[in-house]
Amino acid sequence: MYRKILVAVDGSHASRLATLAAIDLAKGSNAEVKVIYVVDDSEALLEVAFIDREDLLRNMTAYGRDVLLACSELLKAAGLRHSIELVDKPLARGRIAGTILAHAGTWNADLIALGTHGRRGIARVVMGSVAQGVVSQSTRPVLLVRSDPEDES
C-alpha cells in the first residue's frame, strides 16, 4: 500500500512511537522510510530568556543528529530500506510544518508519520502544534501517533 513513508521526528517519546508505527507499516508493505529532523529556528522567547541563538542552534543541530542516528539504528534493526536527513534550515523561520510538507512532496512520500504530544490550553498556544499544521495543510495521508504529556517525562 505505501511505498515511501516520511517520518518527522523531534526526539520526543511521541516521535519514537511514530517511528515504531512507521516501521510496522513499512514492514507490511515493503516500504522505504525516510526520517527527517527539522531544526526549529524560531526565536520565540529567546531575547526574553537571554539565550544565545547561535549556541542554541548548534545544540539543537547536534541533538537532531543524535535523534536521527537512533532512528537509523531502529530501522536498520528492522531490516528496512531507509535514509535520514537533518534539515538545518526550515523554509522560513519557524515554519516546521511547511518544511515537513515540502520534504514529503520532494521525496514523493505516500504517507507522513509524526508524533503529537497531546498538549492542550496555554501549552499548545505557546508551543504551537506542528502536527496540526501538517494535518491541516497536507494533501497526503498523515499518521499521527499520540503520546500523552505524562509519557514525555
Image (cartoon, grey):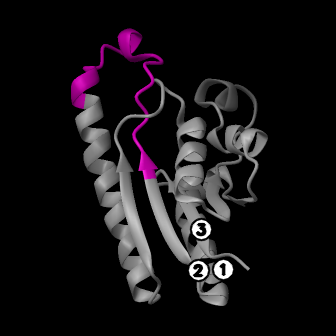
User: Residue at label 1?
Assistant: 25
Compared across the picture, whether 28 is left or right of 153 comes to right
| Position in image of residue 93 (x %, y %) | 46, 23
Residue 46 vs residue 34, the one in the foreground: 34
Q: Say which of marks 3 and 1 sits in front.
A: 3
SS assignment at label 1:
helix
For the residues labelled 3 and 2, the Cα–Cα distance comes to: 7 Å
Q: Residues within 10 Å of mark 1 (few under 14, many from 20)?
A: some
Q: In this rendering, is residue 103 above or below 67?
A: above
Q: Secondary structure at mark 3?
A: strand
Please name the residue shown 52% across and 65% down the image: 16
Crowdedness near tag 3: few (<14), some (14–19) or many (≥20) residues, C-alpha within 10 Å: many
The circle drawn on residue 48 is: none
Local secondary structure at mark 2:
loop
Q: Which residue is mark 2?
A: 31
Look at the numbered discs 2 and 1 and tell me whether their residues touch, using CB distance below 8 Å. yes
Q: Give, as a single range, the part of the protein colored magenta.
A: 37-55
At x 40%, y 68%, the residue is: 83
Q: Which quadrant would the N terminus be assigned to in this image? A: bottom right
Circle nearer the N terminus (2, 1):
1
- Say if mark 3 contacts mark 2, CB within 8 Å: yes
Tell me the number on the disc at residue 5. Answer: 3
149 relative position to 6: left or right: right
Separation of disc 3 and disc 1 at Cα? 9 Å
Asked where in the image residue 7 lies, by quadrant, the reply is bottom right
Q: Are marks 3 and 1 in contact (CB under 8 Å)?
A: yes
In front here: 8 or 149? 8
Say which amino acid is labelled 2. Ala
Q: Amino acid at mark 1?
A: Leu
Q: Look at the image and tell me whether residue 2 can be seen.
A: yes
Q: Label 3 is placed on what type of residue?
A: Ile
Residue at 50% across, 27% down: 94
